[in-house]
Image: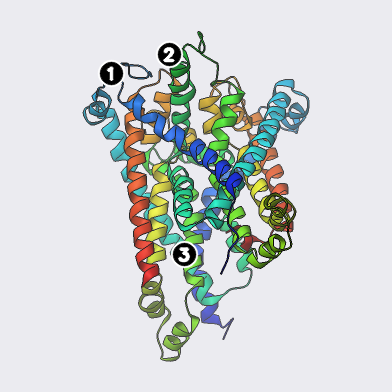
Amino acid sequence: MRGTLSDRMGAALLMAPLLLFLVLAYAWPFLGVVKWSVTLPTPGLGQYGALATDPLVQSVFIRTLRIALIVTLVSVAAAYAITVVWVRGSPVQRIVAEFCILVPFWISVLTRAFGWVALLSNRGLINTWLQSIGFISEPLALVRNEFGVIVGMTHFLIPFAVFPLASAMRSLDDRVLLAARGLGSSRMRTFWSVFVPMTRSGIIGSALIVFVFSLGFFVTPAILGGGRSVMIAELIYLRIFQSPDWGLGAAISVVLVLFVGALMALLFRYVRPKQLV
Amino acid sequence: MPTYRPGPVSLILAVLVALFLLLPLLAVIPVSLTPSRMLAMPTGELSLRHYRALIEDPRWIDAILLSIRIGIVSSAISTVLALCFSLGVWMFQPRFTAALVGFVLLPMVVPPVVSAITLYFLLTSISGFSSFFGYDTWLGVAMAHSVMTVPFATVLILVSLSQLDRRIDLAARGLGASVWERATRIIMPNIKFGIVTAALLSFVLSWEEIGVTLFITSVNAITLPRLMWMGLRDNIDPAIAALSVILIIITVLVLAVRSAVARQRGGN
């Protein structure tokens, strides 16, 4: 039945609009960006050379990698803690944990970044409270620095880290855990030497997703970093709109895509796509 | 049957994470009630002036209406395109399906900032010969949002198609139904929940889209997130806190209704 002429025509007719749309509105303009990176301001690979030597660009790359690593470690650990309860808790615990994961997940990145501004800024909740009880006299600098960026990004990414972990924990066989306990292993030991190793694919998937997301993160660092803790995505924005150097902005984008592509290839080698959902 | 339940240490850690997740959402409530014109905790009296500002200030109204319009148009575009594409994949199982689906999913996996500069290139190029469809126009934003939301719509529709029993389509086909009849009278009624979910998700993603929107708008097409962004970068406007509280309440209500509906569907 497969492959008759009318079948092929039908498939082509149904699939063509979206494919055409994405070729024209996404693939073609991306090639345009690649073209910018090798033609602006002068033709050649000068912008890629600048990427390798410019100390500002390098410091931004290093800061981005550092922040992404810290955020990945903290997010995956935190997500692990709440996912254990979401997947394995009592019915009431599950509902509460699900609420705490899904409500932030569905709230926009701007609202969540603003929530952290309201908590951490000089006149925010934490500083106001600490000053009113006389614990500090000057407000602590909790935002407009790297600390604020890490806190905000971790908050944004925890729900994304939860989903691969949850699917790994759901597919885990209860009887193995009960056997470990029945053979006299303590709670701690069962957790560290049975439970955690058996969810390894979920941990790898979750860490790679969070890491990839945090490399290209824009909104949260821009708001909570206050321009002082610029990451790659914000540098691209600045090179396009503030001190225009479109060629450099485009070159950084191309490098970012290649890097993320390599990481995704790694992800699919270690984790089957179905395990992520 | 005994099951493996989290112990006290797990529970304490999970509670700490839960507090971390909810705290910033709760923190906007007191800020939204401050009588001050700047971001501050209310001291003493509370005020609803920032909620009033949302209704009275035409900038907020205009931005909300624009975001709704862009959301509806872009959700319609991406749902229709995703539906046709998914029907083609499911009904005909063409060769290279995996590669084609992978291509469609690209805007979802490529870092948003790269999609943003790509769409900026597209819209500034279009601006060269059309003034109402390019950079900083609402139609341009709607098209860019469709690019960003269509992978999500496609995933949802493909997932609901994958749960459909192929034999009902084979039966229709054996009885002589045309491709059009199979699609509209057999397949689509069976995945309507997935189609509606795809349309809703596309709308929500467009409604809160900011990363791409920042690159492709400047003064004319000010969507709601774009207006919030402007209020967050300079002197922080507490009206954003009032708006955030409203958005959070809507989210909680929608999730509560959704989980009630899901439980009912699961119960039947």
| Disc 3: CA contacts within 10 A as few (<14), some (14-19) or many (>=20) | many
Q: Nearer the viewer, mark 3 or mark 2?
A: 2
Q: Earlier in the sequence, mark 3 or mark 1?
A: 1
Where is residue A83 drawn, in percent x and y? Answer: 57, 51
Q: Is residue A78 left or right of residue B60?
A: right
Residue type beneath disc 1: Pro
Q: Residue at coordinates 51% horizontally, 60% vertically from top-left?
A: B155
Determine if residue B221 is in view. no
Residue type beneath disc 2: Ser
Answer whether labels 3 and 2 touch (C-beta < 8 Å).
no
Q: Would you identify the image quadrant in which residue A270 lies? A: bottom right
| Chain containing the residue with disc 1 | B
Mark 1, secondary structure of its residue: loop
Q: Quadrant of the C terminus of chain A?
A: bottom right
Residue for badge 2: A132
Q: Nearer the viewer, residue B168 or B105?
A: B168
Q: Are marks 2 and 1 on the same chain?
A: no
Q: Residue furthest front?
A: A184
Q: Residue at coordinates 58% horizontally, 66% vertically from top-left?
A: B2
Where is residue B93 drawn, in percent x and y? Answer: 57, 75
| Disc 1: CA contacts within 10 A as few (<14), some (14-19) or many (>=20) | many
Q: Nearer the viewer, residue B82 or B251?
A: B251
Mark 2, secondary structure of its residue: helix
| Disc 2: CA contacts within 10 A as few (<14), some (14-19) or many (>=20) | few
Where is residue B237 drawn, in percent x and y? Answer: 36, 22
Residue type beneath disc 3: Ile
Q: What is the number of the mark on residue A236?
A: none
Residue for badge 1: B35
Residue for badge 3: B157
Q: Residue at coordinates 66% horizontally, 42% vertically from top-left?
A: A211
Q: Are marks 3 and 1 on the same chain?
A: yes
